[in-house]
Image (cartoon, grey):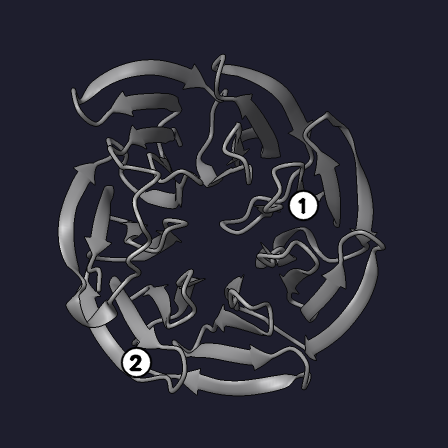
């Protein structure tokens, strides 16, 4: 099965003031026909100018939004792309390819691949980059490992064990002090510097997908196979609430940068926006017929991007 990874350059003023995302006013701003049968992953670059999209064709493409012209292509070597993401400083692009189960790391300024890491777990949520742009954590060779962009040949293990299919989610807190891992064996929070487990919040997480920190690092959100969006209180080691609405399993979750909203995508094809403080559903979009797989907020909070089984990428926005 062939795959595609597209990069779309957005025209945005990085010095513009942050206005914040208003879920009540959110609406479709536009869409992209990504060229693949299904889109599995989307990521907005730190400066908001670029969207990375992973799907079912093998070509990696860069497009300039102003001209709609293709400016660069890459080849990841075959198989589907399950996960794409940017380093915290926007200098690198990380690609998780199912073919060969490899992680590909591209240096964007020169457009070249700088490393291929073998033995990665094929997962829609298989890695996460640190906010400072120095490292990322990935599930490789049966363990979560941290990799430095300055030396990508080897990774330092900080969580052993877990079946190959149990990398259900990993996230880095905004301040860089915590990493959350979601596996079938449970939801845990770690100190990435010392490889020390800080909290254990759920004893079993079979069928869960995706995990994200609140901006203040005090809470986590996960998606469950029942269709619930679950919020966890890290300090209290417990579930703080569940938001119900999806009629199929939840495939992706994201917390807005201002902390007010939670976005979720599900197997029912919908993208939903929730008020984080109380769990009220504020907006629902029938976004991607068949399945909605992926979500990403821009760092300034003005844009939410989704991708799904219809091969399209959709841009949602509403600023206050």
Q: Residue at x 49, y 12 (%)?
A: 110
Mark 1 nearby-residue class (10 Å; few <14, some 14–19, many ≥20)? many
Q: Relative to 146, does residue 203 appear above or below in the rendering?
A: below
Residue 198 image-quadrant placement: bottom right
Q: Residue 45's spot in the image, x, y percent?
A: 42, 38
Number of the front mark, 1 or 2: 1
Q: Residue 291's spot in the image, x, y percent?
A: 29, 57
Q: Relative to 168, does residue 106 appear above or below in the rendering?
A: above
Query: Disc 1 or 2, which lies upstream in sequence?
Result: 1
Q: In this rendering, would 51 be left or right of 35?
A: right
Name the image quarter holding the N terminus.
top left
Write down the residue under mark 1: 137
Q: Residue 184's spot in the image, x, y percent?
A: 65, 67
Q: Residue at x 57, y 79 (%)?
A: 232
Q: In this rendering, would 281 be left or right of 167?
A: left
Q: Secondary structure at mark 1?
A: strand
Report the disc number at residue 245. Answer: 2
Name the image quarter holding the C terminus.
bottom left
Residue 252 image-quadrant placement: bottom left
Q: Secondary structure at mark 2?
A: loop
């Amino acid at each position: 099965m062939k795959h595609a990874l597209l990069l779309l350059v957005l025209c945005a003023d990085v010095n513009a003031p942050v206005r914040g995302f208003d879920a009540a006013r959110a609406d479709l701003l536009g869409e992209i026909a990504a060229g693949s049968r299904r889109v599995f992953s989307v990521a907005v670059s730190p400066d908001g100018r670029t969207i990375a999209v992973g799907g079912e064709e093998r070509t990696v493409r860069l497009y300039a939004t102003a001209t709609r012209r293709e400016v660069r292509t890459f080849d990841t070597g075959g198989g589907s792309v399950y996960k794409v993401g940017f380093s915290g400083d926007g200098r690198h692009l990380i690609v998780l390819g199912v073919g060969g189960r490899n992680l590909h790391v591209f240096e964007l300024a020169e457009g070249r691949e700088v490393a291929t890491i073998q033995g990665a777990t094929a997962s829609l949520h298989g890695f996460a980059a640190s906010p400072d742009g120095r490292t990322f954590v990935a599930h490789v060779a049966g363990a979560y490992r941290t990799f430095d962009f300055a030396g990508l040949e080897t990774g330092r293990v900080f969580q052993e064990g877990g079946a190959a299919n149990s990398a259900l989610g990993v996230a880095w807190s905004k301040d860089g002090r915590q990493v959350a891992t979601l596996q079938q064996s449970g939801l845990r929070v770690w100190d990435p510097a010392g490889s020390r487990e800080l909290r254990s919040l759920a004893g079993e997480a079979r069928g869960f997908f995706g995990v994200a920190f609140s901006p203040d690092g005090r809470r986590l959100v996960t998606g469950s196979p029942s269709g619930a969006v679950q919020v966890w209180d890290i300090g209290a080691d417990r579930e703080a609430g569940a938001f119900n609405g999806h009629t199929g399993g939840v495939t992706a979750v994201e917390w807005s940068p201002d902390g007010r909203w939670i976005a979720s995508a599900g197997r029912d094809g919908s993208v939903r926006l929730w008020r984080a403080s109380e769990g009220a559903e504020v907006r629902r979009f029938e976004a991607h017929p068949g399945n909605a797989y992926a979500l990403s907020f821009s760092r300034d909070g003005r844009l939410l991007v989704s991708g799904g089984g219809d091969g399209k990428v959709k841009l949602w926005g509403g600023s206050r």
